[in-house]
Structure formats: structure tokens, C-alpha cells
Image (cartoon, rainbow, N blue to C red):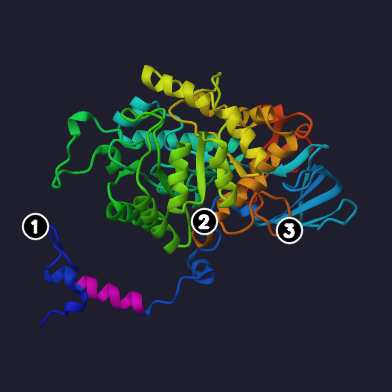
Amino acid sequence: MQQNLMFQPACEHSEACLCHSPAFLRINMVLTRQAAKAPPITTATVAAAIPAGQSTHSNATASATQLKAFINVRIFDGVSDQLREGMQVIVEGNKIKSIEPADTPLPAEATIIDGNGGVLMPGLIDAHWHAIMARPSMMTAMTADFNYIQALAIAEAQATLLRGFTTVRDMGGPVFGLKRAIDEQITVGPRIYPSGAFISQTGGHGDFRMLSEVPRAPADSLSYIERVGITAIADGADQVLLRAREQLMRGASQIKFMAGGGVASLYDGIDVTEGSVPEIQAAVTAAENWGTYVTVHAYTARAVTMAIKGGVKCIEHGQLVDEQTVELMAQENLWWCLQPFLDDEDAVPMANPASRAKQLVMSAGTDNAYQLAKKHHIKTAWGTDTLFDARLATRQGAQLAKLIRWYTPLEILKMATSVNAELCALSGPRNPYPEKLGVIEAGALADMIIVDGDPLTDIQLLAQPEEAFQMIMKNGQIYKNTLENSAV
């Protein structure tokens, strides 16, 4: 019998395999024909395939389909300048159904959550997080079995959610598997906007190879950090285009490009400008073809200016820019994702003296950066950029509260909710969670916290999530509830 080449799989294996065996070809042909005849997968077909009495999700998921009514709460909705009182919030499934006067009769089937006068606010958003690299030390991240690193990331994701952070914008690292596991409710954690591997030139901020690995011949394999998806080393526009497309193929919601020197990297000074306008343009072309954007790691005026010429939409860090550069950022309507880096208890520990020296230079520019951002009305987001320190990861809310040095509590709360949500949505059709985030309004995703106290008058409540956050909900599911009078 003549083989049907339509069903013959391509095979590039050098070792012996079954790809061209008659049995394999026959099985592949039969399965392919059956798949072509199969009905499309819909909610109805999935439900029909589940035996009676069984569920695809946990009891927590089942409860998310019920109505929940939040009463006796004061509401910070993420955008208003003051708390809304005398209202109740109805959640149906994973979304907020309505916000209505407190005397409106509640649906008979609703589960009632009594907030005891606490503040109901949107879940917090960290716009510069590293889910894979927040908890392990740098040495552990570079040398340990990567299954162990992923296990740490799973544990950290659970802790992140219980700190009230229901969404993170991940700025580099192999988080696609973790994101999928969270989305499929295999494990618990925040929503993740993944960048995938950050793109770095040779010797740049994302190149953590040993000197013994350089030079790399064309036939050499990728380094460990490239193989596991932490970084993508690319030199020249064509390589950048390739690496950016690879991240988009894997599910990146935005592309991260290293445009300047960093603190933790081994070979570049913080004054170094990295990449080139054509290389950045290549990344921007790849991203814009997919409807999304490029953000860059950059500290100096020269690096930021080059990135703007390349067409990026957001700057991460920027502590060493000058006013002329900030004026250009304002003209181009750029986002600025700033971190409150100071030489204090939340500074990332740097054992390397050279890195410590760079850290001091960078943190000395933080005050000026925030002042310039405010002066020129730059769209400013907030993130922690926590790296390689398990203790520092627990300080996520404390670092947010630290913004009181430059902003009012109201401005801080807006930044960590609706403003950061707006930056996340910049990924357009690559947005993995296209419904509204960071607000309490009808139709928005039900990510909410009940705070014991008023963060508009005491922003330090955000630094005490264990005590202050009485209820944490993500996607309509309650993950923490210590309210005494709650029926949940």
C-alpha cells in the first residue's frame, strides 16, 4: 500500500526513531482523520464529557459561580478620590456584577460577606516583578536544578497572592509554565503578564555567562541561562528579531529589552548603553506586528534616549535620566515604571563590591527621578523589581507604602491598582486577561481586598498584609477570609 505523504511527519532526528515506521504513519493518519471529524471543543461538549457528580475544578472554583454580596464596606474603587460609602458589591462568578445602594434587597441565593466597616479595594498590581527570580539567591538561581527553582517560584506565587497582589507584570524569566498552572488552577498565584526571556546583547545586563564561555562559536550550544529561558542573548537586528519572535511565540504579553547597564550584572558599568537603535527597532517591529510593545531596562539619559528613538513604549527604572530626557518622554507619551530604590533595608543585597558601588550611584538618583516624573506629568507605574532575596520578597507591600515619600496615599493606591492595570492593558491583543482590572466597577474582574482600616489615611496598612488584609479575592474566589461575621 502506497504511503500517504500528507500524514508523513517531518523528522530531523539524527538518532533512530519511529517517525517513518509504517505503524506510526498509520496511527497518525487515523488520529488525524478522527480529529478532523470531531466537534469543536465548547463549554457544552466539556460538560457532557464529565460524569455526573464530578467537577473539573475544586470546591473553591465551584463556589466562584455563586453570587457573593459584600456589605458593610467602604469602597475604594481604584479611580475615585474618596471612599464610597453606603454601597454594596455583588460578585457573580469571576466578575463584579453590580455596585448598588446598601438598602437594595440582596439576592436570596447570595453568600454574604460582612466587611465590618473595612475598606474594600481592588487587588494590588506589581508592574515590575520577577516570579522566577524573586526568592532564590543569585547563586542558587544560576546553579540549582531548575525544577527546584520552579518549585520556589510556585511557593512564592502563593505568598504573593496572600500579600494581596492579584496581578504581576513579569519583567523577565521563564514564567509561561507557572502562569499556565495558575490560570488552570493547578496552583495558586497572581495573574501573570509574562515577558519571557529578556533580550540582552553580549556582555549586557542579561549576560550572566562565565568568561570561560566566551567567545561562543556558531556551533556552540546555548548557555544554561538561555536554555532555561531567563535571558536571550542577541547581537544584531536579525538576532533580536528572532529572539523577540520566540518570546511572542511562547506567549509573551510584552517584550523586555536590556538597553543599558545594570547593578547586578557582572561585566557592564551602569553608565553603559546597550543595544542600538536598529536592534531596538527590530524588537519593536516584532512586538508591534503582534499588537504589543517593548519596554526597556535603562538608567541613563543616553540609554533612554536611544530606546525612545527605537520606538519603545515604556522605560523601566531610569533613575539617572536628566530633565531633557524626561521632557522627551513626555512628548512621546511614554510610560515610566519606577521603583523606590533607596539605600535602605529594602536594597537588594549585593555581595560584589562593584555591584554595590553601582547600586549606590543608582539609588542616589531615585529622588530626582520621581520629582521629574511628577513635574512633567509622566504616566508613572510602580513595581518592586525584587531579585534573589526571599526576605525582600515579603516586603512587597512595604515597598509600595514607601512611595509616601513622593505621593499621597490616594496617589499610591491608584498607582498600584487602576494605573498599573492601564499599563498591563498596553499589550493590546496579547493581553491574557482582557477584562477590566484594578477597579471595582460592574463588569470588572473580581480581584478585591478587604482592609481592616483605611489605607487612604494609613498607607502603612499595605505593609502589614497578614494583619490588615482580612479578605483576599482573585477571579471571584476567596483565598483568605478572617472576617468574624462572614458566612464564607
Q: Which residue is mark 2?
A: 427
Q: Quadrant of the N terminus?
A: bottom left
Give the magenta part as a residue range.
Answer: 27-36
Instruction: Give x and y (percent) for residue 64.
Output: 64, 53
Q: Which residue is mark 1?
A: 16
Q: Is residue 255 left or right of residue 168?
A: left
Q: Dot 1: what SS? A: loop
Q: CA distance from mark 2 to mark 1?
A: 43 Å
Q: CA distance from mark 3 to mark 2?
A: 23 Å
Q: Residue furthest bottom?
A: 1
Query: Given the image, on which type of amino acid does mark 3 rest?
Result: Ala
Residue drawn at 79 percent across, 44 percent down: 81
Residue 4 drawn above or below residue 97? below
Residue drawn at 62 percent across, 34 percent down: 370
> Which badge, 3 or 2, comes first in the chain's sequence?
2
Label 1 CA crowd tier, 10 Å (few <14, some 14–19, many 20+):
few
Q: Which residue is mark 3?
A: 442
Q: Main secondary structure of the magenta part?
A: helix
Q: CA distance from mark 3 to mark 1?
A: 59 Å
Label 3 CA crowd tier, 10 Å (few <14, some 14–19, many 20+):
some
Residue 264 drawn above or below residue 206? above
> Which badge, 3 or 1, comes first in the chain's sequence?
1
Front-most of residues 144 and 78: 78
Query: Given the image, on which type of amino acid does mark 1 rest?
Result: Ala
**Mark closer to the observer (3, 1):** 3
Instruction: Give x and y (percent) for residue 450.
Output: 73, 39
Label 2 CA crowd tier, 10 Å (few <14, some 14–19, many 20+):
many
Q: Is residue 427 visible?
A: yes
Residue 359 drawn above or below residue 423? above
- Residues at discs 2 and 1 in contact (Cβ within 8 Å): no
- Residues at discs 3 and 1 in contact (Cβ within 8 Å): no
